[in-house]
């Protein structure tokens, strides 16, 4: 059974979307969920006159819609295909976005693994890296928070909390805890010593969308892909190697 709060928010979102699209009857714009992740944010697809939109429910007590809109504008100004924002209500936590489709890079990469195709992944990675360079060269990066030592440690501590303690159920000695602490300090120092750029923070195959596949003169298999970028609202100013490692050491691709 759907919790009442979710039902209430979904109904409010549907009415808001209908108003933004100037639809007479909200019931004529049903919302179909397309994603829900580890956050409180949920995305729905709406269709009007054969055009699709993504309606986002991002409860303001948990999600920052203003940050999404800000980073989205920075990306688009840099020539990165982030979804266009058609409408936003930060107070309610609602957004109406361009629909970038369902073609994530991840399934394509896994299919290439299964078929032992090494050429298409190479092309996708080249374009993903070109896109990343555009992200790193975005202007107005001073508008973003810094990837501080405190934030780096908070995220690295998840390794201890969820892998060592929760998953492996290890009982760490004081000496082992001290060794982990020293190791993380070394990693923090290395990260903070790097030149800083705009960091997406989640730049991997599940947040990159295949938008176009255009045959070229090189042959039918030489596709040119445009990549859409999503889930960037937590972007910060930080180490220039961070996103590249997320892409090339993708935890979803083995």
Image: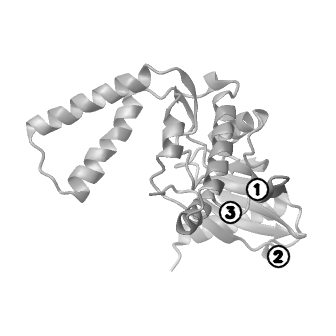
User: Sequence-wise, which precedes: disc 2 or disc 3?
Assistant: 2
| Residue assigned mark 2 | 28
| Residue assigned mark 1 | 223
Q: Is residue 126 left or right of residue 235?
A: right
Q: How far is mark 1 from mark 3, CA to CA?
A: 15 Å
Residue drawn 53% across and 45% down?
247
User: Sequence-wise, which precedes: disc 1 or disc 3?
Assistant: 3
| Residue assigned mark 3 | 103
Q: Is residue 241 above or below residue 195?
A: below
The quadrant of the rendering that contains the C terminus is bottom left
Discs 2, 3 touching: Cβ within 8 Å: no
Callout 2: few (<14), some (14-19), or many (20+) C-alpha neighbours within 10 Å? few
Q: Which quadrant would residue 193 be assigned to in this image?
A: top left
Q: Is residue 194 left or right of residue 220?
A: left
Q: How far is mark 2 from mark 1, CA to CA?
A: 38 Å
Whether residue 92 is visible here, answered yes or no, is: no
């Amino acid at each position: 059974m759907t919790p009442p709060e979710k039902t209430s928010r979904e109904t409010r979102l549907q009415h808001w979307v209908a108003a933004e699209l100037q639809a007479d009857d909200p019931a004529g714009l049903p919302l179909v969920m397309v994603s829900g992740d580890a956050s409180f944010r949920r995305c729905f697809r709406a269709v009007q006159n054969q055009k699709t939109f993504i309606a986002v429910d991002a409860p303001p007590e948990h999600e920052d819609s203003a940050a999404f809109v800000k980073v989205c504008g920075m990306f688009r100004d840099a020539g990165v295909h982030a979804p266009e924002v058609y409408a936003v209500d930060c107070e309610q936590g609602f957004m109406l976005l361009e629909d970038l489709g369902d073609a994530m890079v991840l399934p394509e990469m896994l299919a290439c693994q299964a078929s032992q195709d090494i050429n298409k992944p190479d092309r996708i990675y080249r374009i993903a890296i070109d896109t990343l360079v555009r992200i790193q060269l975005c202007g107005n990066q001073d508008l973003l928070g810094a990837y501080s030592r405190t934030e780096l440690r908070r995220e690295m501590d998840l390794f201890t909390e969820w892998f060592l303690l929760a998953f492996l159920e290890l009982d760490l000695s004081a000496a082992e805890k001290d060794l982990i602490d020293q190791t993380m300090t070394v990693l923090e120092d290395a990260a903070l010593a790097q030149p800083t750029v705009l960091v997406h923070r989640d730049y991997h195959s599940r947040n990159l969308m295949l938008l176009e596949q255009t045959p070229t003169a090189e042959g039918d298999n030489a596709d040119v892909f445009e990549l859409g970028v999503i889930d960037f609202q937590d972007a910060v100013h930080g180490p220039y190697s961070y996103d590249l490692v997320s892409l090339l050491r993708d935890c979803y691709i083995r």
